[in-house]
Image: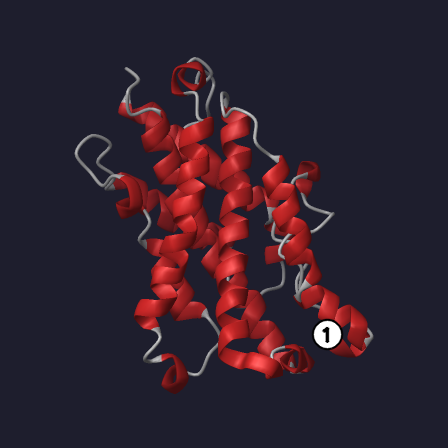
Amino acid sequence: MPPFGPGAPSGRPGLGPAVKEPSKVVWSLKQAYAFLPEFLARLTIRRDSGPIDCVDSLCAFVSTRAAFVAQKTLYGYLKTRMGTRYPSLFEDDVFVASINLAKMHVFVACLADLAVYAAAWSLRAEPVEDSLRRDLASHCFRKGLADNAAQAQGIEGFSLEESEAEFQRRLSFQDWHSGPTGAAFFTASPAALYHWAPIAPKLKKDDKEIVENSIKYTWREVRSQFDKRIRGAILAADLNGLPPSRT
């Protein structure tokens, strides 16, 4: 399954299509779905290195990096746990359904963490109202959901509406001034990766710290990229016209 697909909205990398039933593709294609697109996705991300100086560029960063982190860590955990059995598991329809469900839940958690971090950190030195910070985080989150809405269709146990409602609840408790900083923003994604990864509980019971640390480590590079590229003062001037965070 590709972590980023050529059919992603606006030509930007997204979650890619859901895992197909292996019976409908030849073995070589199944292997490509599981491995090759991850390499191609990394090349796409590396080419994207311009300044983040407007709402659109911030949304693009949040959406693509959330998708990248979600799938890199989810598939990395599965490959490590399954070993040589990993490709053959795509012949199991139950496993295919489970990984599609996990993919969306982990992505939404990554999206939520990064949207709040990006809105808070990019505007930390700017004299803007907290309502604008909240609106910016909400806009980034909604854009990420929209970019990958097609991949969520038909996945039993996942709801875009519930994801939006949960994010709004999170925003209602967000302290934009004396709240978390840096890595402390990233709480939902480690928990989601461990919870939703389709590994038998008895097998992953000793994995919690390792799994959560793997995604925390991956976020370090994303934050480093963000800090180098963000242009907070210019971004702040582009906030007029943002839709309100609550519908």
Screen quadrant of the N terminus: bottom right
- Residue 247: percent from the left, percent from the top? 42, 35
Q: Which amino acid does label 1 sit on?
A: Glu
- 35 vs 180, left or right, is right
Quarter of the rendering containing residue 155 = bottom right
Image quadrant in which you'd find residue 176: top left
Q: Is residue 223 above or below residue 90?
A: above
- Say few, some or many: other residues with alpha carbon within 10 Å of mark 1 (under 14 / 14 to 19 / 20 or more): some
From the viewer's perspective, is residue 189 above or below residue 57? below
Q: Residue at x 30, y 17 (%)?
A: 126
Q: Is residue 104 visible?
A: no
Left or right of residue 126: residue 218: right
Q: Position of residue 77 (x, y in %)?
A: 48, 69
- What residue lies at 74% left-to-right and 65% top-to-bottom? 32
| Image x and y of residue 226, in percent | 44, 34
x%, y% of residue 28? 80, 72
What's the residue at 35%, 75% (across, down)?
207
What's the coloring here? secondary structure
Q: Name the residue under label 1.
A: 21
Task: Give residue 24's quadrant in the image.
Answer: bottom right
In the image, is residue 135 above or below residue 164?
above
